[in-house]
């Protein structure tokens, strides 16, 4: 069944199309023969085949688009012809049709689709399809597609995406490779570059450099992969970047983009925490990588552990008896507590095994924390100060000295009071209620 477009085309001119008696315009498709008729206009379209143009004419004269008899490559050629002839209604329809009905074919012929679509300013939907595909499966693209041949427009659309599934150091390396390909006279070794060479590369990458998350890189990556190209960057930006690695107590400047949203399945199944940046920050502290670094939330995700759910209050109940039933004897646990009526989360880490011994527990590796608005930038981590009273193993739910849970099925009561841990992790002390809590055991991935 052919699609009809009669709402915007006022009359059906199919009969006129089939009438060969008179022409006032001739359009030459592929053929190079000279027309001897006395015509008002003579248009050459060498990129459009007669078969494709016949389909276009049926659309122009009758609003009819017969696609059933066309293979996928021919439909794509019809799209390109419609774009060349500025038939925007047809362009919009065919882009949607291909994306919704011919996804597998487009994926198989991605290089052709991508290269062709970015030569036009009208194929926006196809360009978006290409960018989305590259974001989700960059490894397929970089193995099959000559990355350095990407148009700048395509490269910029790709690297500005928060959900680009690539490590940031790989993004930077590919952008450098792309820049070198645009400047054939430059050698890969930046030590050989003159000031003019750096300026030339800076101009080439001017739209790309602001989109790379340089603050996400590790200190080693910064030293080995960014420092040799320091002359590409504005002085103040480079100094801020350098300070983030040399002085962890320095304050991050505004508008530093967070790490990309890399999707990693199987890390945690939580109703309380939905931000892997928070899990990354807590994991760094567990491994004592950097303690209270103000740039931790800006670094690339550090996810060496799988968080195995042991207990969820809303699922298993809030009785302390249930806590010890499910968590007794389990070491290396992280507890998350959702404060009722707020966007605040409290919690703590215990490397020891939980047990109901009715005694204070000594430990130097415990810590407690708070998070506001599920934002890693708002994580406060407080280390144990009085190691003799890190935890209390009693007959209540998790008791991190300063954070005490006294919960039953109907009374989900909790209290906070600064005393045995270093930092104040919330504005007010005293009692309040929780909405839910979860306990996870961390396991090395």
Image (spheres, grey):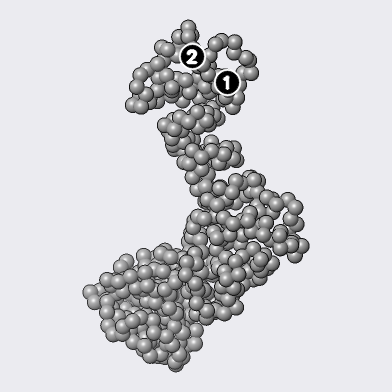
* Residue 232 coordinates in the image, percent (x, y): 64, 63
Say if mark 2 contacts mark 1, CB within 8 Å: no
Image coords of residue 356 (percent x, y)? 37, 84
- Mark 2 surroundings within 10 Å by alpha-carbon count, few (fewer than 14), some (14 through 19), many (20 or more): few
| Residue drawn where x is 44% and y is 80% of the image | 381
- Depth order, front residue of 79/308: 79
Which one is closest to the eye, mark 2 or mark 1? 2
Q: Earlier in the sequence, mark 2 or mark 1?
A: 2
Label 2 sits on residue = 24
In the image, is 231 to the left or to the right of 415?
Answer: right
Residue 114 in view here:
yes
As displayed, is residue 406 above or below residue 105?
below
Residue 97 visible here: no
The residue labelled by disc 1 is 29
> Which of these two is toward me, 105 or 83?
83
Query: Residue at the location (65% across, 67% down)?
Result: 230
Q: CA distance from mark 2 to mark 1?
A: 16 Å
Q: Nearer the viewer, residue 381 or 335?
A: 381
Residue at the top extreme, as displayed: 21
75 relative position to 375: left or right? right
Q: Secondary structure at mark 2?
A: loop
Measured along the vertical axis of the image, is residue 103 above or below residue 257? above
Disc 1 crowd, CA 10 A, few/some/many (<14, 14-19, 20+): some
10 with respect to 129 (left or right): left
């Amino acid at each position: 069944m052919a699609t009809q477009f009669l709402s915007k085309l006022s009359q059906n001119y199919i009969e006129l199309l089939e009438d060969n008696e008179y022409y006032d315009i001739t359009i030459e498709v592929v053929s190079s023969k000279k027309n001897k008729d006395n015509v008002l206009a003579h248009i050459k379209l060498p990129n459009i085949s007669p078969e494709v143009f016949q389909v276009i004419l049926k659309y122009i004269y009758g609003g009819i688009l017969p696609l059933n008899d066309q293979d996928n490559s021919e439909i794509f050629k019809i799209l390109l012809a419609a774009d060349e002839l500025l038939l925007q209604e047809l362009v919009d329809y065919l882009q949607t049709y291909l994306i919704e009905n011919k996804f597998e074919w487009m994926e198989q012929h991605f290089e052709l689709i991508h290269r062709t679509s970015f030569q036009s300013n009208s194929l926006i939907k196809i360009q978006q399809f290409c960018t989305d595909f590259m974001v989700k499966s960059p490894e397929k693209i970089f193995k099959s597609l000559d990355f350095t041949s990407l148009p700048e427009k395509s490269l910029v659309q790709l690297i500005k995406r928060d959900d680009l599934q690539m490590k940031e150091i790989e993004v930077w390396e590919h952008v450098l490779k792309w820049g070198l390909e645009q400047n054939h006279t430059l050698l890969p070794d930046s030590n050989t570059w003159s000031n003019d060479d750096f300026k030339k590369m800076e101009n080439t990458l001017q739209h790309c450099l602001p989109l790379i998350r340089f603050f996400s890189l590790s200190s080693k990556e910064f030293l080995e992969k960014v420092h040799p190209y320091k002359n590409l960057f504005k002085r103040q930006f480079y100094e801020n970047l350098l300070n983030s690695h040399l002085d962890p107590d320095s304050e991050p400047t505004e508008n530093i983009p967070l790490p990309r949203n890399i999707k990693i399945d199987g890390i945690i199944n939580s109703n309380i925490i939905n931000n892997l940046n928070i899990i990354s920050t807590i994991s760094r502290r567990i491994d004592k990588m950097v303690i209270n670094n103000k740039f931790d939330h800006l670094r690339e995700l550090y996810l060496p552990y799988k968080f195995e759910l042991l207990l969820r209050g809303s699922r298993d109940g809030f009785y302390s008896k249930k806590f010890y039933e499910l968590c007794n004897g389990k070491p290396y646990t992280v507890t998350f507590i959702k404060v009722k009526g707020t966007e605040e989360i409290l919690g703590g880490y215990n490397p020891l095994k939980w047990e109901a011994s009715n005694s204070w527990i000594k430990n130097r590796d415990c810590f407690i924390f708070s998070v506001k608005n599920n934002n890693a930038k708002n994580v406060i981590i407080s280390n144990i100060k009085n190691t003799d009273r890190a935890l209390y193993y009693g007959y209540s739910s998790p008791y991190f000295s300063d954070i005490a849970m006294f919960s039953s099925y109907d009374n989900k009561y909790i209290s906070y009071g600064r005393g045995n841990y270093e930092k104040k992790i919330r504005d007010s002390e005293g009692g309040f209620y929780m909405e839910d809590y979860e306990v996870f055991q961390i396991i090395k991935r």
